[in-house]
Image (cartoon, rainbow, N blue to C red):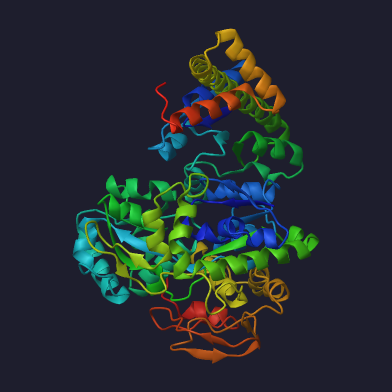
Amino acid sequence: MNIGFLPLVDAALPILAQEHGFAEEQGLHLNFIRDVSWASVLDRLLYGHTDAAHLLAPLAIATTLGRGRPATALSVPFILGLNGNAITLSHKLADVVAPDGKLGDPVAVGDKLKAEIAARATYGHRVRFGVVHRYSSHNYKLRYWLAQCGIVPDRDVDIVTIAPPFAADALASEEVDGICVGEPWNSVAVERGVGRIVLVTAQIWRRGVEKVLAMPAERLDNEREKIERLVRALHFAAKHFVDPENWDANANILARSEYLDGSAKLINRAISDRILLTANAQPVDVPDFMFQYREAANFPWTSQAAWLYSQMVRWDHLEYRAEDQLRAEQVFRPNVYRTALKGLDTPMPGANAKLEGSVTGNMPVGSTQGRLTLGANPFFDGRVFDPLEVEKYLDSLPKS
Amino acid sequence: MRIAVIDENPVRAAIIEDGLAEVGERDVFVISERSGMARAIESIDPDVILIDLGNPSRDMLEEYFAVSRAVSRPIAMFVEQSDDDTIGAAIDAGVSAYIVDGLSQRRMKPILDLAIRRFQAFSRLQTELKEARDALSERTIIDKAKKILIKKRNISEPEAHKLLRDHAMNSNKRMAEVAEAIVTAEQLLGGGL
């Protein structure tokens, strides 16, 4: 099978499934096709150059709903990970809004940022952020955070798209004042001394869905048995990925020229949740920075697809439509995950949807297989998302 | 018709520009710099934008097209999905296109076909260049291996050549591979050559 990917740390699971033989155990051989833009990853997927791809979760939904292109139904049977992104600000801005030597508190940083935006506006400067794609969790989490802090994203700041490899350059040249990107690109900016990591996206939503394994729905249905084998291979790769014993070896594999073509040292920091916030400092522990396996992290909760749809409505200024929400939810295919991993030693949730952001401490939840305990998964503002009440939820959010 | 070619590889951009100019009745503009790309497109106001699939600015461009009112809403090439073959061939060749809404498939097809041929011609050229370079380095390594054989076995140059060739034929390998093994072994064993 051909798998499309962008050189990011969270492309790890398919790569390691092949490298460690988990794919072979399932009778699969994975070839990888690397691209430098999501547009190209998507083109190849839609035109059969690749069988499946590492993709931004919101982009899979946007493609299904026909945003920006003719609608093509995509399916997601497996989540490649939660979070793993950060907000890096230029030193000039970070020094004003964030504490030194540790991560900021989202509310405190947001308050100071709001004041700074107002101050700069008096002399005609608009704060600019770079995100990796219009349909990315980076964009949605950045906007969610800004809006909750009283900043109206479309009115008060500029948010532009920047390819991850250029993010550090854009900070350096003051083209933007902040970036919200995945690893290793925040760390690259930090190492170059052009910015400081002030927040990680896990602080905005502790268990937010990030990249997914996506493929055309038609392919999944035609090759269901084969796709289930791929899901099993990814599951074993995820289990292996989170074991500290394997971090060094995995970082070295991912750094290779055919994969991320980057620094094993920086990749290792991301996968071990040790983040260097600013140049010439010591890495700090950022628990749950990347979240690849525990708590059924790879399970495609339809409520997470629904949350992404709610943000698409919010920021694309769409009319909410129940049938669109349903189409968005149907992109996530929990039943494929269920049949693929049936009988394995892995906890399986009893439900396909949950109240997102409602868990404040370890909470055992109903399961059909094994025992499942979910950890805290709050949004930083304490709001809870109920997929059955999306319109009410949208009404409750700060207006834009 | 106004065509913008975005390519950071100036050689390929020139090859495409050249091809498009031959077809006539077209204004072709080449953009090879990433900075200021959006402004450049705005001032060109193209009907068609050709961009290589490996260009990292595609996401930025699509975002720009989605929000900008300056350019009249170009859309990705496969909006008219009637011609999957052309689109497949374009992706194979590594070219993507954005077409201003309303431009007909009929007018677009010859341009896309030409771009595909030019992209293919360029990658053939690249392959030939690479093969030429490889051939050069193969000859160097074969010469090195021969020198080692001449010295170690005290034989003539034609004999060394025959030895290499026969061994390659018998072991179903290329001469360069056998030569490389000899040179590597010599280096590992600390030979003075």
B179 above or below A16? above
Q: Is residue B12 above or below residue A144?
A: above
Q: In the image, residue B131 lies at what x, y percent? A: 58, 22
Residue at the (53%, 73%) spot, across then down? A293
The residue at the point 46 percent across, 46 percent down is A261
Between residue A157 and residue A79, name the one nearer to us: A79
Residue A62's spot in the image, x, y percent?
60, 60
What x and y, as percent, mark residue A78?
62, 68
Q: Is residue A339 visible?
A: yes
Relative to A232, A146 lies left or right: left
Q: Quadrant of residue B175?
A: top right
The reply to whether residue A69 is visible in this rendering is no
Write the residue at 58% across / 80% down.
Answer: A387
Looking at the rendered image, the quarter that the C terminus of chain A falls into is: bottom left
**Nearer-the-camera pick, B185 or A400:** B185
View extreme (right): residue = A222
- Residue B152, compared with residue A116, is above or below; it is above
Residue nearest the viewer, comparing A142 with A84: A84
